[in-house]
Amino acid sequence: MPLSIDSLTEHDIAKTIDHSLLRPELDDAFVADGCRLAARYDVASVCVRPADVQRARAILAGTDVAVGTTIGFPHGNHATEVKVFEAKRALADGATELDMVLQIGALKSGRDADVLADIRAVVEVAHAAGAIVKVIFENAYLTDEEKVRACRLTEAGGGDFVKTSTGFASGGATHDDLRLMRANTSPHIRVKAAGGVRTLDGLLAVMELGVTRIGATATESIIEDFRARKAGGRPVATAATAPDAAY
């Protein structure tokens, strides 16, 4: 059945959102304000740059908003040992969610064992600390066959989420990719859409496809739109009628 706004709470909407604070030019004040916005709307997490983790953790102390950061970002082709070091440092600084980019070049070269080992190494460090790992594919660079292999390698490596994109490539989350990723992972593996989900309609549409997290910079407008519609009863678009999310 299509999602009904009557069946959702603001908490349901907010806890699908990882508020993204990753652009390289963001200054300290912007990051701090973004963390406070995330706390005000009680989203799932903020995703900050590695150098901002300690600051974000301090601002969000006492809230129910997790601190996430990136590993091997944005290209994925760091040596595994470097990714493991990044993960350990991020965890020590207070991150509890790690969004890692898989080794894109290795995947495209058919070196699946190397991709698997890379994912598994970061997952082992994260899980030992009680943190979760979202594995970013960067689908704009991949064929469908490569996306399917990435799904299977993520699951074999113990990843908690498969994720479409960094937001820095030429394309982001598409409905076709989200369907493919959901179809090629077990139910316990969650799906994150990143790159292009900028509206409440876009969020509702990807939720219908099985997405449980999105990366968003439009957090405030999404939640304020939900509040307005909930109060006014305006109909919402569904996956059948809303345009595809696109970067």
Image (cartoon, helix red, strand yellow):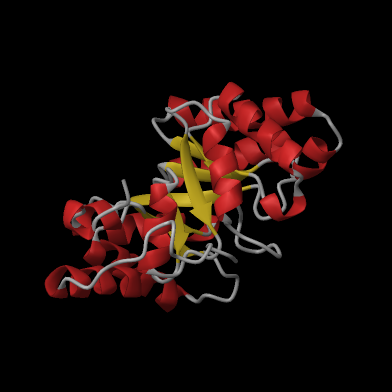
Q: Up-down: is 114 above or below 95?
A: above
Name the outermost residue toward the right: 109
What residue appears at the point 86 percent right and 36 percent down from the top-left corner?
109
Image position, residue 138 (x, y; %): 67, 51
Image position, residue 65 (x, y; %): 29, 53
Q: Is residue 143 left or right of residue 92?
A: right
Residue 148 quadrant: top right
Image quarter in which the N terminus is found: top left
- Viewer-closest of 77 and 53: 77
What residue appears at the point 42 percent right and 43 percent down from the top-left corner?
210
Q: Up-down: is 81 above or below 50?
A: above
- Viewer-closest of 114 and 181: 181
- Viewer-closest of 100 and 226: 226
What residue appears at the point 35 percent right and 52 percent down from the top-left corner?
16
Q: Is residue 141 left or right of residue 127?
A: right
What residue appears at the point 60 percent right and 50 percent down from the top-left corner?
176
Residue 217 quadrant: bottom left
Q: Is residue 193 left or right of residue 79?
A: left
Image position, residue 31 (x, y; %): 43, 70
Image quarter in which the C terminus is found: bottom right
Is residue 18 visible to the viewer in this orientation of the structure? no
Image position, residue 25 (x, y; %): 58, 76
The number of numbered discs placed on residues in the rendered structure image is 0
Q: Up-down: is 149 above or below 198?
A: above
- Viewer-closest of 56 and 227: 227
Is residue 104 visible to the viewer in this orientation of the structure? yes
